[in-house]
Image (tube, coloured by chain):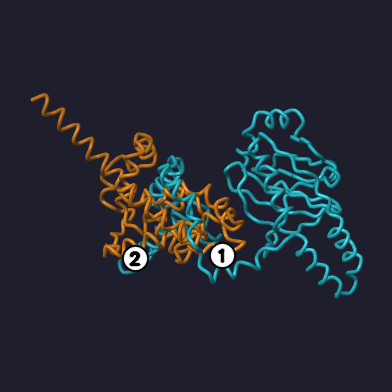
Amino acid sequence: MSHTAQQFQQLTTPWRDRLFSVAVRQTDSRQRAEDWVQESMLKAWKHFSDLKETETVYAWLLKILHSVIVDDVRRESRRAQLAPVVSVEDEELQKHSSSAAGPFEELLQKQNQEQVKTAISTLPSEFREVLLFRDVEGLSYLEISEILGIPKGTVMSRLSRARRMLSSIIIKSSNNSSNHVRAKSTGGMS
Amino acid sequence: MNASYNTEDTKWQELHTALQDLLAGYADNELEDDEVMIVEAHLAGCRLCRDDLARQFSLSHHLSSLPLERMSASLHEKLDRITEQPQNTVETQRQTPKVSTPARWLERQWLKLAFSTGGWATAFALVVTLYMQQIPNVPHSNIPMVADALSEYQTAQQDILPVSQQLTEAPASWPGGTLLSSWETSIGGAPAQVYAMRSGKDIVFQYRINESVLFRNPEVRQAIAQQGSYSSEKNGTEIRALPMKSSGLLMVGPRRAMPAVNDLKIKTI
C-alpha cells in the first residue's frame, strides 16, 4: 500500500461508522445508507489532496456525504418540499400538557431509540441534517455552515425550527399512541 | 390609545416571531452578547418561548446520547480496498509538494537560513541535525496506542515527514525543543494530532490523543495513578504518556533527546 493510501486509511477509518450513522438516519434503507457512504469514501479517496491541513477530517467527510445525498435525492426528483414553519404557538405544542418543560423531559425519557429515529426521519431533509450535525454529531454552527454552504444564521434558524418540529412530532405521536391505548381499554370494557 | 396599544402589540409580536429563530443559538451559547440580552429580556415575559427553550435543551441533551449505528462488515471490507481505485491524476500531482523527507525539509530550512542575516548559528545547528541523525532501532509494544505511536515514528524517520501549512502550538514545550511539523493521524483507533519536534540533534514526536485511548490500558492507568505518568524505554527509544486537561499526551523519541520531566511545560487547555 502506498504511503498516501495508508495515510488515507489511517485518517478516515475511525470515522466510517459515524459517517454511516449520519447516513442511515436520513433514509429508511440501510442499503441506501451504505451506498451513500461507499460513494462518499470513494470520492474522498479520489479527492484526498483537496483535504486542507487545517480542515477536520470528519467535517470534510460529512461535506462529501452531504453532496452525495443531495445528488442522489435530486436524481430521484424528490426535491425538498417547503417545510411548514412550526412556531411556539403551534397547536400540537399547545394542546398537550406534555409540552411544558418537566412533562416533555419525562416524555423524552420514555421514548425508545426507534421512536426517536422514526421521528427524526419525518423531518424535511434540510432541517434533519442540521439537527443531526448539531445534536447527534456535536458539530459547531460554524462547521455546519461550512459543510452545508449556508450562513451561520441559517444554521441557527433551521435548528430552532427543527427542534420545534421534532418536539411537535414526538408530542403528537405519544398522544396518538396513548389515545389508541385508551380506546382499546375502553373497547375491552364494553 | 387603542392604536398605540396595537402598535406596541404588533412590535412585540414581530420581535416574538423573529426571536424564535434565535432560541437554538441561545440554548447552544452561540449568540452575540447583544442578542443574548434581547432574548433574555423577551424570555422574562414570554412563557411560550421559555417552554420552547426548555424543550430545545431537553431534546438536544437527549439526542446527544443516541448510540452509534454501525455499518456492515462487508462494507468495511470494501472500504479497506477503496484505495485500490485510481486517484485523480491532477490531484495526485498537486499533492506531491505536501510531503518531503526530514532531510529535504532540513535542507530547505538550511538554504533559507543560509541566505538570511543572523541565521548562521541556526543553520549550523541544522547541518548538525542533518548529518548526525542517529536513529535507534524502534522497539515494538503490546499496548495498541504505544504500538501505533512507535510505528508512525519509525515510518516518518525512514520515509517522509508531512509539511504542515499552518503550525499550531504543540501541547508540550521544553527549552531547545522546536516544532517542525504537525499533522493528523490515528492512535488507538481514534483521531490524534502529531507534533514533530526537533530536540537537540534528534526528532521527538508528541501526540495529542483521545483521553479514553490514554486510559484504556491497565498498565498505563496504574502508572498514571501511581506516578502521574507512564514511561517505558527499549533499545534507546523512550515513550511517555501523560494525562492533560481533557486529552492525553504521548511522547516518542530517543532517550537522549527526551526532555527532563521538570523542563516540560504542558498546555493545560
Mark 2 and mark 1 on one chain: no
Residue tagged by mark 2?
B10
Q: Are marks 2 and 1 in contact (CB under 8 Å)?
A: no
Task: Characterize the local packing of mark 2: few (<14), some (14-19) or many (20 or more) Cα atoms within 10 angstroms.
Answer: few
The quarter in which the C terminus of chain A is drawn is top left
Instruction: Name which residue lies at 57% across and 52% down.
Output: A11
Residue A4 placement (x, y as % from top left): 59, 58
Residue B172 placement (x, y as % from top left): 76, 49
Q: How far apart are marks 2 and 1 (CA)?
A: 54 Å
In the figure, is residue B54 to the left or right of A186?
right
In the figure, is residue B245 to the left or right of B94?
right
| Tag of residue A49 | 1
Q: Which chain carries label 1?
A: A
What hue represents chain A? Answer: orange
Type of residue at label 1?
Ser
Instruction: Name which residue lies at 86% across and 52% down.
Output: B175
Q: Mark 2 lies on which chain?
A: B
Relative height, residue B47 to residue B105 (above, below): above
| Tag of residue A152 | none
SS at circle 2: helix
In cyan, which chain? Answer: B
Type of residue at label 2?
Thr
Residue A110 placement (x, y as % from top left): 35, 34
Residue B41 in view in this figure: no
SS at circle 1: helix
Residue B72 in view in this figure: yes
Q: Which of marks 2 and 1 is in front?
A: 1
Relative height, residue B64 to residue A126 (above, below): above
Nearer the observer, B21 or B202: B202
